[in-house]
Amino acid sequence: MIVKRAEKAGFCFGVKRALDMAERTVETSSAVSLGPLIHNQQVVKRLERRGIQVVNALEDAKAEQALIIRSHGVAPGVYQEAEKKGIKVVDATCPFVQKAQHLAAESAQMGQQVIVIGDKLHPEVQGILGWAGDQAIPIQTVEEARKLPIYPHLAVLAQTTQLAESFAEIVEELKQHTEHLTVHDTICNATAERQKAARELAEIVDVMVVVGGRDSANTRKLASICAERTKTYFIETADELEHVWFSEAKCAGLTAGASTPDWIIEEVLKKMSEMNDDGMDMSSWDAGFQELHLGAQVTGKVVKITNDEIFVDIGWKSEGVIPLTELRVARQTRPEDVVAIGDEITAVVIRVENSEGHTVLSKRKADEAGAQDRLKHLAESKEEIQAQVIEVVKGGLVVDVGMRGFVPASQIQLGYVEDLNQFLGQTLRLRMIEFDPGKRKVILSQKSILEEEKAVKRKHLLETLKEGDVVTGVVRRMADFGVFVDIDGLDGLLHISDMAYSRIKHPSELLKLGDEVEVQVLKLDQETGKLSLGLKQLKESPWDQAAQKYPLGSIVTGKVVRIVTFGAFVQLEDGVDGLIHISQISDRRVNKVEEVLKIGDMVSAKVIECKPEAKRISLSIREGAAEANKAQDEKAIAEQPEIKSMTIGDALGEKLSAENKE
């Protein structure tokens, strides 16, 4: 008997994506799925063994657990409720289902009556209805469509696993129920392709076997399509195959639903192929095979690679299987990056036979066993090694040293590390600080190496550095009172008062973390190693030119920057402030400075004292105003027109002269 497998069968893109997301999630956190992740009980049980439990209601999920939304999707209310409860959501909804959800929501918002063609009890349809709103209507048959009334506007879409022919028939009927029909063909391409491949195969074989979960809608549709064309059997696993089904068959066909994993399909295909040879069944396979036991080291050839498993021919009745987590130290690993079909590898038996009949193997354990002698030597010698960071976990980093090595967060750098993710993929310099092969415990430190190097540099600097030296360093830490500058491993304090001649409120106004800065050594204590640095000392003090810029008696302008009980400070330039005493503010009595001045005011004042050596300038608005008034008076007098002088006699003479003329 010839066994033919449909060209398109097994996991679709959406299911593969959902399982990959679930596998990645459970590696880093506790996880549950809202309902079975896919309609295949074998896969669901397998996920349960990995730690992904099924909950049927959001109330059953805990805040510390990641909630995986299965490929069928959910209504928007589920996301909102999860957010209220503080539950992290991992959305594994199939992209094709998401498209249908969004189209349903948009159609409802446009005022169209939404019709969803599909099984109203199916979780995918229930989710789409949730996005479409309370007025959406699910139908499954042409008869249900005929009973619908007339609507002004209709929008129709389908469950992604619907039969294309059934969808087309219902759409034709809906045209009679509206003048404006919007058709959204949301049937998944993968579903249509599988149905087409199954139909074509069923027409040329004597018997068909359809493999998949009995709760899977798309698998039931495949079985229905095949049954219309030839004798068809619907099974979940290879154990259900019966020899009598193929007794008269010359050619048998095999297909599988979108939620059926490859390992189940391969098992069914292999058993079908073996069963038809002279009536052979699986019971004859046990003879002649070596006995396997837990912990045995075996060698085999890689015969198949899937997204989450490696199949190895170890000469047993079925292949050995290496789960992705047992492939190598790095958990998030693509199988094809580690092995290729045809490779001969060594692995350790960690389970003689699982529920699928495969021997479960671990390549990682075999590699670890080979690395233990080397790691033991490194633990004793304290030699420096290099290793790549392969994972970020709570409290530190995981590195690959032949075993999973752990670098605590406190052992990565000399200072506090805020973001561990920055080290992912980096190569660290490490030293073994603890090794227990029995507990598979490997603790490493990069900090110990850096501390030794820092101590050497520190000793050298303390011996060679002297006060007055100008050095370059990097800003490593910042506080309200200043910044700490790393000078080749020696930390020095650059106090805020030594950063600039002007007054600054916080060091961040001038510097930021990581800045390279040139500073002067102000003080160095050889015994304690304390180092004080200065930045403003490398610049000219604005007070050096103050005597020339602000001579006694000159009128200056500045901004009020600080008010105290005895007066106000006025900024004349960056780093130079002058004091206006309260008695010099006005020619009248001032009880409080704030009665006359406020911060930000621009004022003119007279310099009444200038002592640059003491960094002191005294100003007077009162005297400045008096001088300004005096100058204004003098200017007004100077600008008056000249008046010709006249005596009394002159005045009387002019009057008598006028009278005589009369």
Image (cartoon, rainbow, N blue to C red):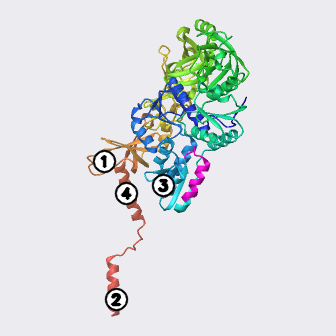
Can residue 352 be seen by looking at this rendering? yes
**Mark 1 crowdedness (10 Å alpha carbons): few <14, some 14-19, many ≥20:** some
The three-letter code of the residue at mark 4 reads: Lys
Please provide percent x and percent y for residue 52.
Answer: 49, 27
Mark closest to the chain's N terminus, 3 or 2:
3
Residues at discs 4 and 3 in contact (Cβ within 8 Å): no
Could you tell me which secondary element the residue under label 4 belongs to?
A: helix
The three-letter code of the residue at mark 1 reads: Glu
Q: Nearer the viewer, mark 2 or mark 4?
A: 4
The Cα–Cα distance between marks 2 and 4, rounded to whole angstroms, is 45 Å
Query: Which residue matches tag 3?
Result: 108
By secondary structure, the bulk of the magenta-drawn segment is best described as helix
The Cα–Cα distance between marks 3 and 2, rounded to whole angstroms, is 110 Å
Could you tell me which secondary element the residue under label 2 belongs to?
A: helix
Mark closest to the chain's N terminus, 1 or 3:
3
From what the image shows, is residue 414 above or below residue 568? above
Classify residue 95 by image quadrant: top right
Q: Is residue 173 magenta?
A: yes
Q: Is residue 167 magenta?
A: yes
The three-letter code of the residue at mark 3 reads: Ala
Q: Nearer the viewer, residue 42 or 236?
A: 236
Q: Nearer the viewer, residue 270 or 60?
A: 270
Could you tell me which secondary element the residue under label 3 belongs to?
A: helix
For the record, the magenta segment spans 159-174
Query: Which residue matches tag 1?
Result: 594
Query: Which residue matches tag 4?
Result: 630
From what the image shows, is residue 65 above or below residue 220? above
Can residue 485 be seen by looking at this rendering? no
The Cα–Cα distance between marks 4 and 3, rounded to whole angstroms, is 83 Å
Classify residue 79 by image quadrant: top left
What residue lies at 68% left-to-right and 28% top-to-bottom?
247
What residue lies at 58% left-to-right and 57% top-to-bottom?
172
